[in-house]
């Protein structure tokens, strides 16, 4: 085995708790040195997937590989990974130094041979603790107890404890959820910087799409135990695989409207709220679709007197850096993202909308899968 190679592979991994399926046939390849974020709502299976990689839960079926080693059945201590929990899980009666040192005191087994790995000497442990503390700005806190630290400092102690023995991969379960908004932003930056310095593999669980979009090299989105889409954050935002991803990613989320699809001599025609968009393309792009739904991001909708979609203004939300205009179109609510410099329409006003057609996504209403995006057809 090549040391410190930490690509992680899940093949057909399923986890059942009684009759409930928490993770359903998960196939996922995580590259060495990647920062992969498992993203999804509560109960989607992302934490269960992470716990199976860590060895805290065993899969009902399927195979988990770390590096070149199948780790099914191995104890967490034998997988050469480190876990950072939401609750920090620090020892309250120990100093920061002792908390960081704790993983070095445990006897581990070699992943390949199964033989016990010698415990570092006292001097070696002290050096490793000081190096980890310095990297995370904790050198002045080593003699303090966790209760004397701020939430952000306690999170850094948890990270230092995870990294002190140079694991092959870091597994993080909602590590920032206990921090306030300002500290979360600061710690996001620090985590990405740490990942770059360590050149290690990070697998990070969150329900917060801002964390996912700003930190990940790739995002794996889950819903109801199933993997929905994997890709770089911008790709997932620009080309969602299905309606769940389209509505889950983005704040505010993608606008969704029912539409009708017809086929003519020159290609396809999409009818949206009385407006017709001709799509000169091959019919097989939408073959088998019994009905369609269109999606468009709030920043790709404009208020324009020449627009051919009628709408009624419901409200205007002022956010300081931008404003969101909520409108009704044929009984469906849409959000328009605007600059605060734009004219503010009055609630109840009748307006016209124009969609940036190259950003219009077409989904199969039955399967919910994206059929095509108009900009890809040019």
Image (cartoon, rainbow, N blue to C red):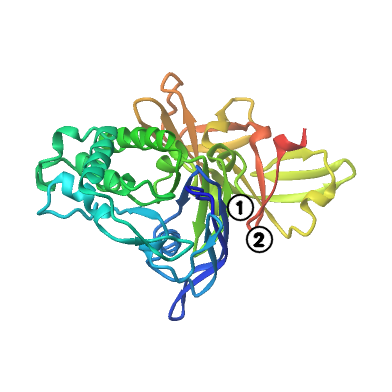
Say which label, 1 or 2, has the lower sequence index: 1
Give yes or no for contact between labels 1 and 2 (Cβ–Cβ under 8 Å): yes
Rendered position, 18 above or below 26:
below
Nearer-the-camera pick, 369 or 157: 157
Left or right of 163? Residue 97 is left
Residue 143 placement (x, y as % from top left): 10, 41
Question: From the viewer's perspective, is residue 59 above or below residue 267?
Answer: below
Residue 109 in which image quadrant: bottom left
Q: Judge the density around disc 2: few (<14), some (14-19), many (≥20) Cα neighbours within 10 Å.
A: some
SS class, disc 2 = loop
Residue at the disc numbered 2: 367
- 51 horizontally vs 308: left or right: left
Residue 219 shown left or right of residue 295 in the figure: left
**Image location (x, y in percent) of residue 78:** 40, 62
Q: Is residue 77 visible?
A: yes
Residue farthest to the right, as pictured: 265
The residue located at (30%, 38%) in the rendering is: 184
Q: Is residue 366 above or below residue 257?
A: below
| Placement of the C terminus among the 4 image quadrants | top right
Q: Secondary structure at mark 1?
A: loop
Residue 4 x/y as whole percent: 47, 47
Is residue 218 left or right of 361 when viewed as pictured? left
Can residue 179 be seen at all in this image of the molecule? no
For image coordinates 36% across by 38% down, the residue present is 191
Residue pictured at 73% horizontal, 44% vertical: 270
Q: Which mark is residue 242?
A: 1
**Quadrant for the N terminus in the image:** bottom right
User: Nearest the camera: 135 or 11?
Assistant: 135
């Amino acid at each position: 085995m090549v040391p410190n190679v930490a690509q992680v592979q899940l093949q057909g991994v399923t986890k059942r708790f009684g009759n409930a399926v928490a993770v359903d046939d998960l196939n996922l390849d995580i590259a060495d040195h990647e920062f992969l974020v498992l993203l999804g709502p509560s109960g989607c299976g992302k934490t269960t997937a992470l716990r199976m990689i860590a060895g805290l839960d065993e899969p009902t079926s399927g195979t988990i590989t770390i590096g070149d080693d199948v780790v099914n059945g191995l104890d967490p201590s034998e997988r050469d990974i480190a876990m950072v929990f939401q609750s920090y899980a620090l020892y309250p009666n120990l100093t920061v130094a002792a908390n960081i040192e704790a993983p070095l005191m445990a006897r581990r087994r070699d992943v390949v041979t199964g033989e016990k790995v010698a415990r570092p000497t006292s001097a070696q442990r002290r050096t490793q603790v000081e190096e980890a503390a310095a990297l995370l700005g904790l050198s002045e806190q080593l003699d303090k107890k966790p209760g004397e630290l701020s939430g952000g400092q306690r999170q850094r102690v948890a990270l230092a404890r995870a990294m002190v023995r140079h694991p092959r991969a870091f597994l993080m379960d909602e590590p920032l959820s206990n921090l306030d908004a300002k500290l979360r932003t600061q710690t996001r930056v620090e985590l990405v910087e740490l990942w770059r310095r360590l050149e290690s593999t990070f697998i990070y669980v969150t329900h917060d799409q801002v964390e996912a979009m700003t930190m990940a090299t790739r995002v794996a989105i889950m819903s109801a135990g199933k993997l929905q889409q994997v890709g770089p954050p911008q790709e997932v935002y620009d080309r969602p695989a299905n309606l769940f991803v389209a509505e889950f990613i983005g704040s505010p989320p993608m606008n969704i409207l029912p539409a009708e699809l017809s086929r003519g001599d020159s290609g396809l025609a999409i009818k949206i709220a009385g407006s017709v968009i001709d799509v000169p393309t091959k019919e097989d792009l939408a073959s088998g679709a019994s009905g369609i739904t269109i999606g468009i991001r709030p920043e790709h909708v404009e208020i324009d007197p020449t627009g051919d979609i009628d709408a009624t203004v419901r409200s205007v939300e002022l956010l300081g850096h931008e404003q969101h205009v909520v409108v009704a179109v044929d009984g469906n609510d849409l959000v328009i993202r605007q600059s605060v410099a734009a004219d503010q329409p009055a609630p109840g006003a009748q307006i016209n909308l124009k969609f940036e057609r190259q950003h219009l996504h077409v989904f199969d209403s039955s399967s919910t899968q994206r059929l095509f995006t108009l900009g890809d057809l040019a």
